[in-house]
Image (tube, helix red, strand yellow):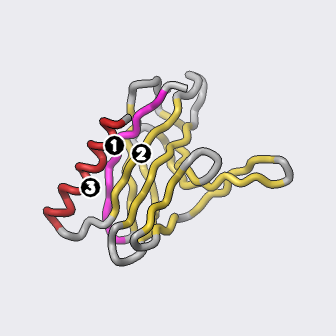
Amino acid sequence: MKFFKVIILMSCLLPLSAFGQLNICLGDAYSNEMPPSASNIAVYITISNVGNHGVNLESVTSIDAESAMIHRSTLGNGMMTMQHLSELYIPSQETVRLEPGGMHIMLTDLRRSFRAGEQIRMNLNFSNGLVLRVDVPILEN
């Protein structure tokens, strides 16, 4: 897992020096291995905005799934429910964590089943025009 953090951090810093306009860094991306029959999978990631202006995560796409949505899990009346978010605001100089029991990215209608050690490719599309690709490692439960 440490290796992936270093790669993701390096991918954030290199474009920063090259273009001076990249203000989003991604880290700690992962998903837990699901049963082979599962057609959906939750992805967790940390999104940091190091820029001077807030930015929205407007959409997520994946070649490995039919669709991808930003969700918020909430507990109400003893039941866990998921609410679709049309976008996710990341304030300037803040970090937003998508984690179990809270916000996450839900990939639906997976094109195949994914096992521990494999990766799912996603593109995160931001309101400032930035598109970041992340290869999400699948972790063993």
Q: Quadrant of residue 54?
A: bottom left
Which is more toward the observer, 42 or 1? Answer: 1
Q: Residue at x 56, y 64 (%)?
A: 86
Q: Horizontally, is 89 left or right of 118 in the view?
A: right
In the picture, the disc for residue 12 is: 3
Q: Horizontally, is 76 left or right of 99 in the view?
A: right
Query: How far is mark 2 from mark 3, CA to CA?
Result: 13 Å
**Badge 2 density bin: few <14, some 14–19, many ≥20, Cα 10 Å:** many
Q: Horizontally, is 64 left or right of 141 in the view?
A: left
CB under 8 Å between discs 2 and 3: no
Q: Main secondary structure of the magenta part?
A: strand
Q: Residue at x 75, y 47 (%)?
A: 80
On the rendered image, what quadrant is the C terminus found in? top right
Query: How far is mark 3 from mark 1, CA to CA?
Result: 11 Å
Magenta region = 128-139
Magenta run includes residue 134: yes
Please tell me whether residue 140 is drawn above or below residue 25 in the rendered image: above
Q: Horizontally, is 91 left or right of 121 in the view?
A: right
In the picture, the disc for residue 28 is: 2
SS at mark 3 in the image: helix
On the rendered image, what quadrant is the N terminus found in? top left
Please tell me whether residue 38 is drawn above or below residue 85 in the rendered image: above
Q: Residue at x 38, y 66 (%)?
A: 49
